[in-house]
Image (tube, grey):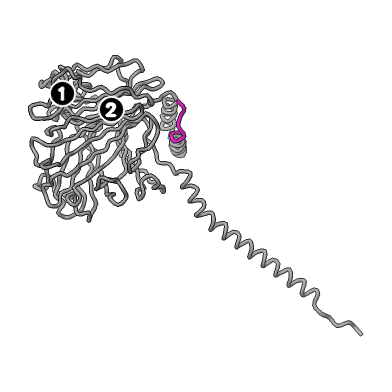
Amino acid sequence: MRMTDVWKRDFSIQLLECALHNNFPCCQMLFQKYLHELNSSWNKLHTTLFCPTEIPECQQPDDNGSYTNVAYTRADGATNTLHYVYSSRGLPTLLVARTGLKSNMTVDWKSFLSSNYSDVKNSVTFTQKPDYAYAVVFTKLYEYDDIEDTADMEKVPANSSLWITHELSDVIWENSSVDFTQRLHTFNFSVVTSSSSLMFNGNGSLSFTLTIQGKDTRNSILPHLAFNANTSQFDVRMIGLEPAFNSSRFGLEIHLVTSLPEDTNRMDIRTHKSIDDEHSPGTFEMLDWTSEGDLQMKGAFVQWKPVCYSQFDYNTRSASKVKHYDLQNTTLALNAHPLLLYAYFGDSLSDGSLGVKALNVSYGIIGDKFYAHTGYTGWMFSVGSGLPPSDMVSLLVILVISIGLGIPVLLIAFGGITMCVKRRRDQRDSLYSDISSPYTPIQ
């Protein structure tokens, strides 16, 4: 594949940063990723498969009224294939595995749909062992009473009556919807009720929409996050939820799981600031939750801008704040029902051989009159592997800045030159005046 100009700029900037800090391992890792990018292309999305129609559990809700939503897309590149598996069974989970081109995913549906969790183990397999896999899991929706209007979950006393934890393993899922073309696949999983919460009374819903692109572009919806060959994007929307408190705000717990053990897969969150808010007006930061991986481009990331929206129409007037908190060391035990992960990773999920961390984010800003004011929160973020996309200062912005700074500089320079020329000319005229001054001849 021809490496895109955006990726070239990202690579150049990060390589320069490594060189300036004399960080040879960093430079080596970047070159490995550069070679991988040259040999990769994820622009061919293949037909999405759902739970087979001949299996009753796939077409009918379970005893609680929840549907089994499973979607699959493969993206073939020049030398590798990315397999995307998205399921709401147990917990809403996206699993991404990278294999050779001729590898296929197989599912033992009887085992995967079994009510006996031990049967679920290793029911999702690939004909070639993936060289890397990662997953994003949504585990909990937090609701807290922000009576002090701080928009900060950490300032609310823990283990108090000001908190409600909604386990996403207890919710009831609608039948999924899908919209896909040759280069764009979109899946929407929505929660309509819960077996343990009154939050979804009425018309309230919680939805997770996954979008997979087959080309480098930007999302048409604010904050216009970038797609590249290795990324997909989530749009999380909380619509018309019934708050339990007068000052309710919401937060979300997310797990990032990678197939590399944590001692070689350090995770952290980095904030990148920019002078350019061209794509998301008023937002000058980008956050990357990264796992460094090794030198073969084995590293996953979650990327977002610290902005969410309080109305269905994402615009600057409805923009609010996303606050993140420190990463947490954690595990995903079977009693949390991470069934898709257990179906693929098996016992590795609990034996410490995977990299697992959890992140909490909360939504809202001081003075916004809390969630109940609009009854809506929407947040978009990207997930992927390799180098996270970077927001570069565009040519248009460079031209605007250059014109804005250049014209005053030119005017000052022109004015200075004009003054110097005038002063020089005045000095010369004064000298000529002295030489040619009137004199009286000698008689």
Estimate the x, y position of residue 391 in percent, counting from the top left.
40, 41
Residue at 26% across, 24% down:
72
Q: Earlier in the sequence, mark 1 or mark 2?
A: 1
Figure quadrant of the C terminus: bottom right
Label 1 to label 2: alpha-carbon separation: 28 Å
Residue 134: which disc? Answer: 2
Q: Which residue occupies the extreme bottom position in the image?
A: 443
Whole-percent x, y for residue 79 in the image: 40, 20
Query: Is 374 or 388 nearer to us in this picture?
Result: 374
Task: Tell whether 423 sits left or right of 288.
Answer: right
Q: Quadrant of the N terminus?
A: top left
- Which amino acid lies under the numbered mark 1 shown in the image of this protein? Gln
Residue shown at 29%/49% (left/top)?
A: 319
Asked which quadrant contains residue 212, the reply is top left
Give the magenta-colored segment's residue range.
1-7
Mark 2 Cα within 10 Å, few/some/many (few <14, many 20+)?
many
Mark drawn on residue 59: 1
Q: Position of residue 85 (x, y in %)?
A: 25, 25
Determine the residue positioned at 49% across, 54% down. 404
